[in-house]
Every structure is written in structure tokens, then in C-alpha cells.
Image: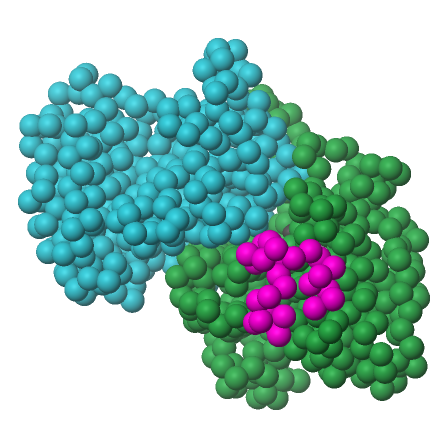
Chain colours: A cyan, B green
Amino acid sequence: AVRSMSATARKSLTIGLIPADGIGREVIPAAKQAILALGSDLPKTEFVELLAGFEYFKRTGTALPDETVEILKYDCDCALFGAVSSPSKKVVGYSSPIVALRKELDLYANIRPVISVRGNEKPSVDLVVVRENTECLYIKQEELTVGPNGKEARATRLITERASRRIGQIAFELASKRPRKHLTVIHKSNVLSVTDGLFRETVRAVPLLPEVNGRYNDVTVMEQLVDSAVYRLFREPQIFDVMVAPNLYGDIISDAAAALVGSLGLVPSINAGDDFVMGEPVHGSAPDIAGQSIANPLASIRSAALMLRHLGYTKGADRLDIAVDQVIREGQVLTPDLGGKSKTEEVVEAVLKKI
Amino acid sequence: AVRSMSATARKSLTIGLIPADGIGREVIPAAKQAILALGSDLPKTEFVELLAGFEYFKRTGTALPDETVEILKYDCDCALFGAVSSPSKKVVGYSSPIVALRKELDLYANIRPVISVRGNEKPSVDLVVVRENTECLYIKQEELTVGPNGKEARATRLITERASRRIGQIAFELASKRPRKHLTVIHKSNVLSVTDGLFRETVRAVPLLPEVNGRYNDVTVMEQLVDSAVYRLFREPQIFDVMVAPNLYGDIISDAAAALVGSLGLVPSINAGDDFVMGEPVHGSAPDIAGQSIANPLASIRSAALMLRHLGYTKGADRLDIAVDQVIREGQVLTPDLGGKSKTEEVVEAVLKKI
Ligand SMILES: CC(C)[C@H](C(=O)O)[C@@H](O)C(=O)O
Ligand SMILES: CC(C)[C@H](C(=O)O)[C@@H](O)C(=O)O
């Protein structure tokens, strides 16, 4: 299972930065500044700027250069990814670099905590989406044929016992450490009895694994069909604590949950594997506001905090999170997505002052 | 394309009733009473009670008897379906009868209008989800294999040009008749470039079909990735007018939209094909409240109205809709899901009085 790694062993920290497209290029530098402000709470820290993205594809014909993957694999301890733009038309040869990175680095757990901060959200939300990050429809096995009635396209949705078990383990572990100790398994096994049936059964069987040793006995488990999970998220989000889902449902559910806390611009994530972790704000590249210096940097800074926490730098992570929470609560320096009038840099400055 | 059929040609009307499971057995009789109250606005009307559902499966080993399908096909002009329960564990041989019925009767368009009525919802919602109803992951082609790392399950997601075109036609037709004339195409082509790419391109090309003859030139088209569509539905539902989506996204999005108008208990749908239409409340069988006479009958009555409207009985449909709207607006006689204390029958009585 993914474990928070021990920070003590590390003499230095090398962080890959992959801003990629759109506002990714504005929020990743913000996260870098925030990390730098932590000073001696981290070992000697180096940053490596790495290329990827749809813009990069348009210039070079590749969205994720091999060099980026290799530097991440061999030289970096962790990374921060910005956001990728989606082509507005079909583009031959293009494939999403974030999906490829998750796969190449086997970052099988996408962990997305969604928490109300301002306290005026009703009802208040405090949940974590644990999204399987390597399979489902994201394996990108698709084919196009031409039949008597025209084109036919098929995609394969893969659900394996192995991937369902390891994501289930992450989810139970997380749930067992939270006050409410509650896990909701998201699926659509009333239609996909074989694939989602396997996901559901495998996740539910995690507490019975020999190595678990009764550790999850106090975790309560509920199930929810994905359609009704989205419905209930809107209606009574307080019923959810940890939600575990196959890849695509997790993608949809985390956006739904993000809508409940004011802005996608607040929601962080990590893509975690057994020996690598990559922070990534949940928001996209937002081409409509890119280049205007009004992107919300908080999801990116929070993603840095999540990443550092995962690496064992609890104190540094806490300092970032507390600073971000204070800025949100005070409500004086916020970007337009949160109803404020401040620029990205002003929000970064406000956070830096609190760190 | 699905067309509203001409009502004048019909001397009598035979309506199949398939209550199926849970509160389906409470809300379908309610719809029947409402239809009966229309009297001479309809031709001589007969009802045929038909069997299907998970409960029926538990008794007989089949969820959808051939007889039900045959009577629908050969003896009925239209039908009303209640709801099916989902097995809480894997059940060998069980397959959802509603999915089978949509397929068997080629009811390729699932049309789900979601509208705020009370006027106190902010922001107010007035949209229609047009969901492709026969393919995507709903074709139920799944297989299970055992590999070196354990079980592996695969499902096929099918998107055809033919089905995408015909659902696109329904969506454009609908959009062109609404005041805002706006259509949003839902997909996830940043990941599923082949299948969702085909869906998106085919739908977008509908206005160029020769038979369209410029009729859709004033329909504005937007696209939205499914995850961000759900986010925006929560944040700014007023931007949506008609939404067209492949099967599974449509399933999720219609539940999300339903959450915005107060209750799933209000949202109707029709499953429409070229020569058959089946009304169906969007809510499920709600085992937690089944048998308590507190199920909200309004989605079912509205589904009857949608079905009748589709068949050309505009006056009857209007009478049902107006009666339901009045009951909701007055707010005196409502079931608990809407914050009321009334029983199903009391709500039905209130509606009947207004018809
Ligand atoms: C950009 C896209 C491929 C990605 C996904 O679907 O995983 C994004 O929506 C996310 O949630 O990280
Ligand atoms: C019961 C289930 C198979 C069905 C679906 O997924 O289509 C339901 O959720 C619906 O929306 O009608």
C-alpha cells in the first residue's frame, strides 16, 4: 500500500514542476514560492522544471516527452503537475499527458480531500475522494470500425482485482484514521455487474485480508450507485466521509464535491504510488482566464501541502494548510472565483505572510 | 427521429403498467388514477398490468418475462414503468429489466426535463437531459478472466455513429423548439478520444444533415466535459438548456440535475423510440421507504404527462402538468421528500382535485 514515506532519511528533496497548460503556468510557480517559504522545515530543496502539455504537443507533436518521465523517475522525489488543456477538436496523435504520467509512474491512488473552510457553507463538507487512477476507461484501449450502419467505436473498461484491492486498502487505511471512520464504495453494479461487481466485492473484502489483522473492524461501509452518489452529494454531503471509486466515477465525483466548497480553485489532490507522489490541483487549465493573473493558487499550494505530508514533512504541510485556511477565512484577499478581486500574486503574498 | 405521434388516428389507448419494485408499486397506481381522471381528453383507455423487476426475479428466476415484452410490443400503445431494485450482492443470472426493455423496444431517447417549480430555488433550473438510451456501457458486454495477478474484468463501451446521430437529432429538435435554443454536448473526449470523439463529432454534425435544411441554424452549441458539466450544474445550472449525453453520463447528469430542484421525486422521464414510448419516474425503488405510503407520486404522474404529450395528447398532458405544478406551488400537500407530511394518496387526491 501507499505509505507516507519517512522524511528523516532524505538529505535533499528534488521536486519536479510540470506547469503544462493554461493557468497551470500561474499556479505551479505559486506552489513553488510557498514551498520555498518553508525554509528549514524541509531539507535542501531543488526544483526541476519539466515540459508536457497540449501546448507543448502543438509545438512538438508529443504531449509528454520521454525526458520528463525519466527525470521524474530517476531524479525527483516528487512532483507538482499544473493542468492540461483539452483539444477542442479531434487531434490525431494527442493523448493526455496527465493520464500517461499516472500510468507511467504507477500513481495508482488519486486522493482528493474536499473540505469546507469558511464555515458558512451549509451543509459543511469534509470528505476525501479516493479515486483509482490507472484503469477503468482510462486505459485508452479504443478502436474504430466501420459497419453497415456507419462508424462504430468501442472502448474497453478494465477493472482488476489487484488495482481494486490496492485502492481499497488506501481507502480503508484513510477511513480508519479519520474520526468518523466511514467508507462509501461507489459503483454501478446494477448495470456493470462484472466489472463494478469485481470492484465492489474486492474493496469490501479488504478488511478480511490477513495482513489487515482486524485494523479496519471499526470502519463502517456503505455503498452507493454513482448516479445516486452524485444526487446525495448535492443533497446531504455530510453523509460522506471517505468515498472510494473506480477512475471515471472518481473523476466526476470529485468535481461534484468540489462544487460544494465554493470553487474548484480550492481542491487539491495527490497522485500517489508506492514510491512516488505527484501533487495536482483538481481544477483544469481554464483557458478562459489563463494569462490574466486571476487564477486561484490555493488548490496548487494545498496540493504541495498534501504532497509534503505524504512524504512525511508534516510540519511543513501543516504550515501551508494553516496559512491557506487563514487567508480563506479572513476573506480579504481572494481571487474572483471566490468572489474576491485579488490577483494570483496578491493571494500568494497573503499566504506567504502567514507561513 | 422520434416524433410526437398523431393522437387523432387512435380510437383507443392501451397503456402497459409495469410497477416492478419498491415504491414503483405505489407511484404507478397513482399515475393510473391521474390518467383516468382525464376522461374524454383521451380515447377509450385500457390498462394492462405487466410483471418485471428484481422481486419478480427472486420468485421466478427471470427479471423480465417474455410475455411482458410481447404484450408491450403487440398490444400496447405506450407504457409506464415504476422502478427496479438493485441486488445488494452479486446475483447470478440477474440483469436489470429496465435496461433490457429500453433495448428490446429500441427506446433510444431518454428525455428528462428538470424544472424548478416552486420559484424559490436559486438559481432556477429549466433544462432537459437527452440521454442516449441503448449503448455506451449499457450494452452489458462484460467478461471476467483470471490472470497472474488475480481476476480481471472487462466491459465494452460502444458508441455508434447511428445512435449518436439519432440522439443528436432529438436533442437539436428539442433545442430548436425551446426559447433559449441552446444545446450542450456532454462527453469526455479528452480521455475517450475515439468513442466520445465519435459521439461529439456526430452530434455536432447533425445540423449539416441534408434533411435538416437549416432548421437548427439558430441553435447555439456548447460542449462540456462530463466532470465539469456536473461541477457547473451545481454552480450555475442556469447556463444549461438542452444537454445531450451518452448513456452513462446522462444517467449521472440527470440525477445531478434532479438534486437541484428539490427531489428526485419530482423528475419525470420518457424512454422514446420511433414507435413506442414508456414513461418512467427518474427516482429508484427506494426500498427504505417502500410500503409506507409516503412515496412521492408526482414524478410518476409527470411521466404520464410526458408520455401523453409525446403521443399527441397535449391537452391531457397539460392538465396533468398544471395540476402537479399547482400542488407543488401551494405546498400544502407534499410528501416528506419535499418537506411535507402527507401520504402518497393524499398527494394523489390533491392532484385529482386540480385536474
Ligand atoms: C484532464 C483529465 C484527463 C483529468 C482526468 O479525467 O483525470 C482531469 O479531469 C482530472 O480530474 O485530473
Ligand atoms: C436502475 C438503473 C439501471 C437505471 C439506469 O442506470 O439507467 C436508473 O439509474 C435510471 O436512471 O433509470
Quarter in which the N terminus of chain A is drawn: top left
Q: Is residue A118 above or below residue B332?
A: above
Q: Which residues are magenta?
A: B325-350
Q: Looking at the image, is B221 positioned above or below residue B315?
A: above
In this rendering, position of residue A350 left or right of residue A271: left
Task: Name the spot of residue B2 as percent of width and height, x first.
Answer: 72, 75
For the point 71% across and 61% down, the residue is B346
Q: Give the quadrant of the C terminus of chain A.
A: top left
Q: Nearer the viewer, residue B72 or B149?
A: B72
Q: Tell me if residue A56 can be seen.
A: no
Horizontally, is A128 left or right of B309 in the view? left
Give the camera-side residue of A258 and B249. Answer: A258
Position of B15 relative to A123 (above/below): below
The picture quadrant where one finds residue B306 is bottom right
Residue A166 point in image, percent of width and height:
47, 26
Q: Who's the residue at 59% across and 83% down the image? A: B177
Answer with the quarter of the image where residue A161 lies: top right
| Position of B263 relative to A159 (above/below) | below
Can see residue A182?
yes
Find residue B197 and report its horizontal and vertical position in percent. Answer: 52, 61
Task: Judge left or right: residue B331 versus residue A62.
Answer: right
Is residue B333 magenta-colored? yes
Dividing the picture into quadrants, the one containing residue A65 is top left
Magenta stretch prevailing secondary structure: helix
Report the residue at 61% width, 28% height from top.
Answer: A201
- Residue nearest the observer in this picture, A307 or A263: A263
In the image, taking residue B78 as reference, residue A117 lies left or right, namely left
Q: Residue B95: x percent and y percent?
A: 76, 43
* Residue A144 is inside the magenta segment: no
